[in-house]
Amino acid sequence: ETGVTQTPRHLVMGMTNKKSLKCEQHLGHNAMYWYKQSAKKPLELMFVYNFKEQTENNSVPSRFSPECPNSSHLFLHLHTLQPEDSALYLCASSPIRVGVAGEVNEQFFGPGTRLTVL
Amino acid sequence: ILNVEQSPQSLHVQEGDSTNFTCSFPSSNFYALHWYRWETAKSPEALFVMTLNGDEKKKGRISATLNTKEGYSYLYIKGSQPEDSATYLCAFHGNTGKLIFGQGTTLQVKP
């Protein structure tokens, strides 16, 4: 166990649905991340939060809306998604945002949510 | 565009074989190179974070080397076991502050 949990593990939704993915970390970390892995592609960074502030939005469409109410929880709100958004969505955390003041600390990942958009 | 390449994409070996795979990354603006092990339906798990040219790290039967000047890292597994079956990811940490991941090498170890 990495100390990072994600719910749900699997989600099927229609294009008009609204749903949310949840991530929780029990490690006392201050940075949290959303990644996307599409079929046969590398992990792709979507969003970064450092001390609850969004510090990175990697040109993600507005139908994905992140929320970080505190350093332990991260949400990804989904609205009017497309079938091509079907992918594995992974959450990660680290003590501080990778790259801040040269920090190279490792990221701890959750098991992911497998999302299918019909 | 920063590119991180891993080879081979997949590998099938017999139990007891030793194996190695490669991660290629940009040789400029280097901060660190991360290796992760990812079993199916589980979380990616950090193996190593390597920062210095010539670095060599070891965890049990798994070891890794780093050459930042030419931009490559090797991961070695000695005496592969079925439980080593997983996808091995490397990630380049440069001056953008982001981790850029390779596509991974999927290892299958047959008993």
Image: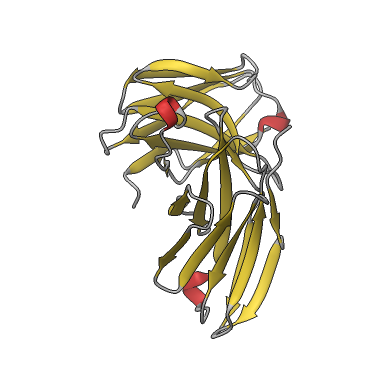
Along the line of sight, the residue nearer the viewer: B71 or A53: B71
Q: Nearer the viewer, residue A52 or A99?
A: A99
Q: Is residue B63 above or below residue B38?
A: below
Where does the image place residue A94, in percent across and percent down from the top left? 37, 36
Left or right: residue B1 versus residue B108 is: right
B19 to B16, vertically: above or below: above
**Which residue corresponds to the image point at 63% horizontal and 27% vertical from the top-left?**
A14
Q: How is the image coloured?
A: secondary structure
Q: Classify residue A98 as left or right of residue A69.
A: right
Quadrant of the image containing the C terminus of chain B: bottom right
Up-down relation of residue B13 to residue B4 (above or below)? below
Query: Which residue: 31% across, 44% down?
Result: A3
Q: Is residue A101 left or right of residue B86?
A: left
Residue A40, position in %: x, y? 71, 48
Q: Is residue B89 in view from this perspective? A: yes
User: In x, y percent, where is residue A43?
Assistant: 61, 41
Q: Position of residue A4 (x, y in %)?
A: 36, 41
